[in-house]
Amino acid sequence: HLTESTLEEALPALLEKSIERGWRAVVQVGGQERRDALDQHLWTFRDDSFLAHGTEHDPHPGRQPVLLTCGEANPNGARVRFLVDGAAPPDLSPYERVVFLFDGHDEAQLVAARGHWKAVKAAGHAATYWQQTPDRRWERKA
């Protein structure tokens, strides 16, 4: 639950943590325009670093440690899936972790997140809820 950061500020650090754990990640976005903007952002988000990644349309998507997609496929064999911009989740069972990132200041995203929470719980998945604190840390709420 993003309350202090934008997606562009929070996502790179979460992806870096995933890579540090040895996980491949797939980021499912709500549309091609957003995917392309995140693609550019991940190359330049920090002066001293970049995040190796690709999109489902790039050559060899299966080799990418982080893959940006508008679809439900998992061509890079990711163990963690990030869903942003209200992207509809695919079957979640193949993943070790699934992270729904949503803007706490956007009513439509809040409503969608509540629906996803209910669906995940109803499907029997273990679910936890994390929200940003004023200092941009993550605090477990449920």
Image (cartoon, grey):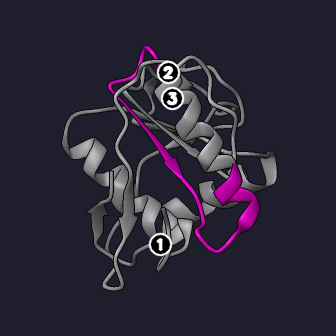
Looking at the image, residue 9 lies above or below residue 128? below
| Label 2 residue SS | loop
Residue type at numbered disc 3: Val
Q: Which residues are magenta?
A: 92-111
Q: Nearer the viewer, residue 115 or 6?
A: 115
Looking at the image, residue 128 lies above or below residue 110? above
Residue mark closest to the camera, 2 vs 1: 2
Q: Circle 2 sits on which residue?
A: 92
Residue visible at 56% across and 35% down in the picture: 118
| Label 3 residue SS | helix
Mark closest to the chain's N terminus, 2 or 1: 1
Marks 3 and 1, Cα distance to the nearest angstrom? Answer: 26 Å
Q: Circle 1 sits on which residue?
A: 9
Mark closest to the chain's N terminus, 3 or 1: 1
Looking at the image, residue 45 lies above or below residue 65? below
In the rendered structure, the answer to whether residue 31 lies left or right of residue 103 reads right
Q: Where residue 26 sits: x, y (%)?
A: 50, 35
